[in-house]
């Protein structure tokens, strides 16, 4: 019998991309007190996406400061090197982009061997059907609601149908529990529809870290 993912409420993962990084420890604690379930870390390399952020060093520092598990999202051209590094730095999940490498199976396996749960991220233009051959290897699928690289972009509405299609594929083709995460443009306006479409984890950067009241913002996503 397949163990169903969280059916009552979505889990919420604030992206530290929009946090005040001069006070990272306090920001992590404040989000945990507000009800955040995980911390989302956006690793960018200036190649796969036109922006550059941070790497395993900050994953490790975040791990020391956080109580909640870390969800690392690699937007980089070389997941095979840095995926296992981030796993060893203490991430619970490490996801990388399907579009970034021809060696998807190899990278998923390397991340698992390094001690994290592997996830595969898909850009808005990549159809969910590409996952069918990898269902035995992924623990999480990250569906982008925007093209990756920056916080604060507008959600692409075709993403709803994509999540519904993915949910059908997972129900039909695997007995494994594979979580669906959605990232990019998630706000209090679309959270409910995303959850109803099948999302288990809602990632949000600017909506959560830009809020005056973190507790109210997290509650809006879970409502
Ligand atoms: C975008 C990143 C997201 C980003 C989301 O490329 O992957 O995790 O932080 O930011 P918002 O919620 O502002 O779209
Ligand atoms: Zn992300």
Image (tube, helix red, strand yellow):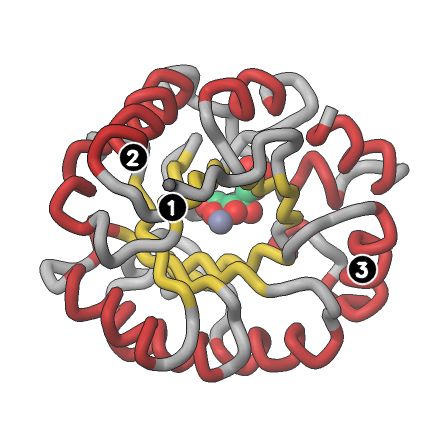
Q: Earlier in the sequence, mark 2 or mark 3?
A: 3
**Mark positioned earlier in the residue sequence (1 or 3):** 3
Q: Secondary structure at mark 1?
A: loop
Q: Nearer the viewer, residue 90 or 41?
A: 90
- Give the residue drawn at x 65%, y 42%: 12
Disc 2 residue crowd, few under 14, some 14–19, many 20+, Cα 10 Å: some
Mark 3 = which residue?
27
Q: Position of residue 179 (x, y in %)?
A: 43, 44
Q: Disc 2 designates what residue?
A: 170
Q: Foreground residue, 159 or 200?
A: 200
Q: Position of residue 159 (x, y in %)?
A: 38, 23
* Left or right of 1, for residue 128: left
Q: Secondary structure at mark 3?
A: helix
The numbered dot on residue 118 is: none
Q: Is residue 22 at all visible to an observer of this figure? A: no
In the image, what residue occupies the spot 44% across and 57% down? 73
Whole-percent x, y for residue 220 in the image: 76, 27
Look at the numbered discs 1 and 2 and tell me whether their residues touch, using CB distance below 8 Å.
yes
Q: Which residue is more in the foreground, 183 or 5? A: 5
**How far separated are the C-alphas under marks 1 and 2?**
7 Å
Quarter of the image where one finds residue 74: bottom left
Instruction: Indicate the quadrant containing the C terminus: top left, top right, bottom left or bottom right.
Output: top right
Q: Looking at the rendering, in which quadrant would you find the N terminus?
A: top left
Where disc 2 sits, the SS reads helix
> Against 167, is 212 above or below?
below
Name the mark nearer the viewer: 1 or 3: 1
Q: Is residue 30 visible?
A: yes
Residue at mark 1 to residue at mark 3: CA–CA distance: 29 Å
Circle 1 residue = 178
Q: Is residue 158 above or below residue 138?
A: above
Which residue is depicted at the point 10% across and 59% down?
102
């Amino acid at each position: 019998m397949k163990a169903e993912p969280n059916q009552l409420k979505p889990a919420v993962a604030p992206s530290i991309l929009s946090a005040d990084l001069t006070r990272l420890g306090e920001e992590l604690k404040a989000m945990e007190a507000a009800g955040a379930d995980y911390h989302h870390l956006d690793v960018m390399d200036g190649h796969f996406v036109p922006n550059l952020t941070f790497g395993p060093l900050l994953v490790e520092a975040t791990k020391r400061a956080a109580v909640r598990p870390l969800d690392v999202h690699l937007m980089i051209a070389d997941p095979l090197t840095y995926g296992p590094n981030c796993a060893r730095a203490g991430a619970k999940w490490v996801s990388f982009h399907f579009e970034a490498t021809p060696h998807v199976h190899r990278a998923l396996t390397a991340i698992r061997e390094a001690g994290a749960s592997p996830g595969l991220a898909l850009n808005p233009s990549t159809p969910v059907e590409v996952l069918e051959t990898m269902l035995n290897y992924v623990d999480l699928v990250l569906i982008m609601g925007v093209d990756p690289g920056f916080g604060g972009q507008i959600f692409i509405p075709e993403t709803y149908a994509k999540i519904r299609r993915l949910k059908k594929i997972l129900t039909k083709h695997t007995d494994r529990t594979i979580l669906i995460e959605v990232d990019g443009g998630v706000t209090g306006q679309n959270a409910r529809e995303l959850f109803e479409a099948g999302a288990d984890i809602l990632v949000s950067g600017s909506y959560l870290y830009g809020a005056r009241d973190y507790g109210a913002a997290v509650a809006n996503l879970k409502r």
